[in-house]
Every structure is written in C-alpha cells, then in structure tokens.
Amino acid sequence: MDAADATVEKLRAQCLARGASGIQGLARFFRRLDRDGSRSLDAAELRRGLAELGLTLGQGEAQAVCRRWDRDGSGTLDLEEFLRALRPPMSQAREAVIAAAFAKLDRSGDGVVTVEDLRGVYSGRAHPKVRSGQWTEEEVLRRFLDNFDSSEKDGQVTLAEFQDYYSGVSASVDTDEEFVAMVTSAWRL
C-alpha cells in the first residue's frame, strides 16, 4: 500500500469513526469549500478543509491524494472521485449479489446492460409518464438505465458501473445480511 492509499484508509477510518454522517458530512463540507463551483479542490484547500473537520493531513499527504484522484490533470481533486475512494470496500457477499443482479439484467450475456436487455426483464408500460403519453417505454427504460450509468450516459451499463453505483448504496448499509436481502428483494433474485 502506497502513501496515498494509506492516507485514504486513514481518512476512511476517521470518517467511519464519526458515524453514518462522516462521508456524507464531508461531501457537504467540500461543496461549501468549492467556492467557484468547479467541484474540485487543490491540495491546500483539501488540507485546510479537512483540518477544520479534525482530519489532519500533511502537505505531502494532501498532494499525494490529489494526484491519485486528479483524473483530468488539472492539479485539483475531483470531489466525486475522492468521495468514491472513501467508500469502504464491499465484501464478497455484497459483490456476489450485485453480480447476480447484473447477470439478471444482462439478458444478452455480453457484459453490458442496454435498453434491449431491460426489455427482456422489465416493462415500462405501467409507468405514469408512459400512461399519460409524456414518455415512451423506451424513454422510461433509458432513464432507469441512466441511474446506473457513469457520468457519460451512453446507454450501456457495465458490471463495473453497476458495482460503482451499488458501492455508494453499500456504504450506508451496516450488515452484509441487510444489503444482500435488500438487493435480492429489489431485483427479485
């Protein structure tokens, strides 16, 4: 484990010690620090902000975290990526139930869920906006699929994108048993 990973682990532990509001509270705090609306912070802003929360990072640690999660090379930390990094890793039980739900959706078996795959599993005909004529069934299925898609909505959801969506859900569910029951029920596995 390198220094940036160790820093993220330290921050994750401090957030979890703060209880359920730890990571959510950090997200709200970062949004307040992001005065220009860029959804990013430089290393100095990150360090200052976390210090206000009682989460101490050295300048080198803050720079290493920023470099690790700076996807566009801007020299700043993308908040969504950083918050994603703070999510605790999922257990094998959670990953298995997510994979089972994905497999149910991926009717073609090609590793990508599309609107065509969804048609084989779900119907959007009963959706209120379809019934009122505002949307087509295709639009309902596409909007449903977009919930799981990455920031670039391409109409295709990979297992990695599906897992990423559920890692956010997983962070707010205490036990594996609760998480597995929730996903099993939601997807009728």
Image (tube, rainbow, N blue to C red):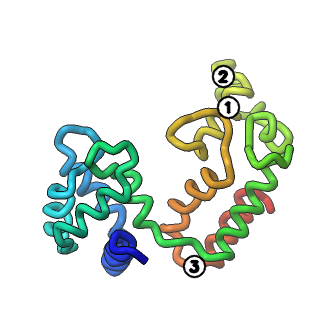
Q: Quadrant of the N terminus?
A: bottom left
Residue in the picture at 60% in, 50% down: 161
Residue 118, percent from left and from top: 78, 40
State which tag comes first along the sequence, 2 or 3: 2
Residue 83: image tag: none
Q: Which residue is mark 1?
A: 140
Position of residue 86 relative to residue 92, above or below, is above
Q: Is residue 183 visible?
A: yes
* Disc 1 residue crowd, few under 14, some 14–19, many 20+, Cα 10 Å: some
Residue position marked by numbered label 3 in the rendering:
175
Label 2, label 3: how many angstroms apart (C-alpha)? 38 Å
Q: Which amino acid type is marked by label 3?
A: Thr
Q: Are marks 2 and 3 in contact (CB under 8 Å)?
A: no
Corner quadrant of residue 4: bottom left
Residue at image coords 33%, 74%: 3
Mark 3 neighbour density, 10 Å: few (under 14) some (14–19) many (20 or more): few
Residue 75: x percent and y percent? 26, 48
| Nearer mark to the viewer, of 2 and 3 | 3
Name the residue rendered at 77%, 31% in the picture.
Answer: 125
The front one of 188 and 95 is 95
Mark closer to the chain start, 2 or 1: 2
| Secondary structure state at the residue bearing disc 2 | loop
**Which residue is nearer to you in this view: 87 or 65?**
65
Residue designated by label 2: 135
Q: Amino acid at mark 1?
A: Val
- Which image quadrant for residue 138? top right
What is the spatial separation of the Cα atoms under label 3 and label 1, in whole angstroms? 32 Å
Choose the circle earlier in sequence order: 3 or 1. Answer: 1
Foreground residue among 133 and 104: 104
Q: Is residue 6 left or right of residue 60?
A: right
